[in-house]
Amino acid sequence: MTDLETPAAGHGALRRAAPALLGYAAVRALGLLALALWSAARDKSAYTLLTARWDSLWYTRVAELGYGYEVRLPNGDVHSNLAFFPLLPWLERLGAAVSPLSYADAGFAVSLLASLAAAWGIFAVAEWVYGRRAGVCAVLLWAVLPVGVVQSMAYSESLFTALAAWSLYAVLTGRWVTAGLLASLAGLTRPVGLAVAAAVWVAAIAAHLRGRDGAAPERARGDGVRRVLGMLLAPLGAAGYVLWVGHRTGGGPLGYLDVQAGWRNGFDGGAAFARFVAGKFTSFPSALAGVGLVVGVALLVRLYVACVRQRQPLALLVYAGIVIALALCASSYFGSKPRLLLPAFPLLLPLALALARWRTSRSALVLGGVAVASAVYGAFWLNGSGPP
């Protein structure tokens, strides 16, 4: 299949995606307006909240000074900036080098552009699977998520989601080399890049096993070579950075895990998260938060089951499943789990398909109401405890 045969390619690509992108931009603008008003009422800078707190500070420090900075806490923990993957800091450094922007400004600009690219990628995937109307709904659902404000922060979630979505679209349309290259870049962005590489591998193996019915032998051999090349490229970004960290720290291939351990991050199969949720039921009103967490996890499982029942392409199921598993089964700070799930956009496709079947006025009313609620919650959340 060639690029010209895919719905998201060609001269009409932007025109087809325009309603989704305009709707996405409107939702994000509403969120930023709410944040600006809320922050001003609390005598805070909305721009500082977006670009100079939590992880965004670590990214700009990497961009400015490189790797090697660490903070030693009184309890013995060591927070090293080696925990942060390099693609976003590289882009921040590039932006500052070719423009008058600061590293923080460049990070904000990268996130804004990447969030639009992510929205377009989500539209392309959803349109390919369920049609244009569902594609628009999928993008708007991603925009109105309660933690959607993170999409506009100098964080790596938007950049990663853009790379992941377009890599998955390349898989769906049989462009294996492109899929592998984008998966490799996703692997340089966040540890969960493993999910994109795994999706490329599983989809490529499945395509090989299915064979190419009716394809000429030359075409089949060419497709096979491209699949293998895509598979080889997909894990290079993540593997390269992890191995480099291990070499730099002297910890060998597992050195990156030692760096993460200094942040109290690890993979325990969800035991720590289960204890955290159980602890909420020891008193009131924290038990209400416990109920909310249980309901939230149940909703994630329900959506994933719906994805399976609707027979989403295998690449999407593998990708979403790994993103969910890494988010819920890691022993990282529990307040960060909602934003760690932000890239799991295939979970939204069953809801998008349902919305697409409604009348336009009804779906617009529902999405508009949720957008307002999301904007208010994002402003409240960012002026309070999150996102870590």
Image (tube, rainbow, N blue to C red):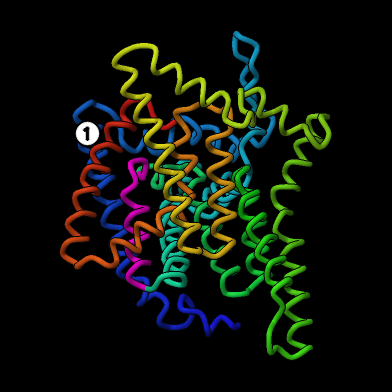
Residue matched to label 1: 38
| On-image quarter of the N terminus | bottom right
In the picture provided, is 212 more to the left or to the right than 273?
right
Q: Residue furthest front?
A: 309
**Pick the front one: 10 or 355:** 355
Residue 215 screen position, x and y as percent: 70, 88
For the point 57% across and 34% down, the residue is: 329
Magenta span contains residue 242: no
Residue sitting nearer the eye, 249 or 69: 249
In the image, is residue 129 above or below residue 51? below
Tag count in the figure? 1
Task: Report the residue at 44% width, 62% height from top.
Answer: 122
| Highlighted range, magenta | 132-148
Q: Which residue lies at the image location 45% right of the left edge and 20% below the top edge?
A: 278
Would you say 206 lies left or right of 112 here?
A: right
Indicate yes or no whether the magenta region holds residue 138: yes
Q: From what the image shows, is residue 135 above or below residue 291?
A: below
Foreground pick, 15 / 297: 297
Dot 1 amino acid type: Trp
Residue occupying image coordinates x 64% and y 16%: 77
- Is label 1 in a helix, a strand or a loop? helix
Main SS, magenta residues: helix
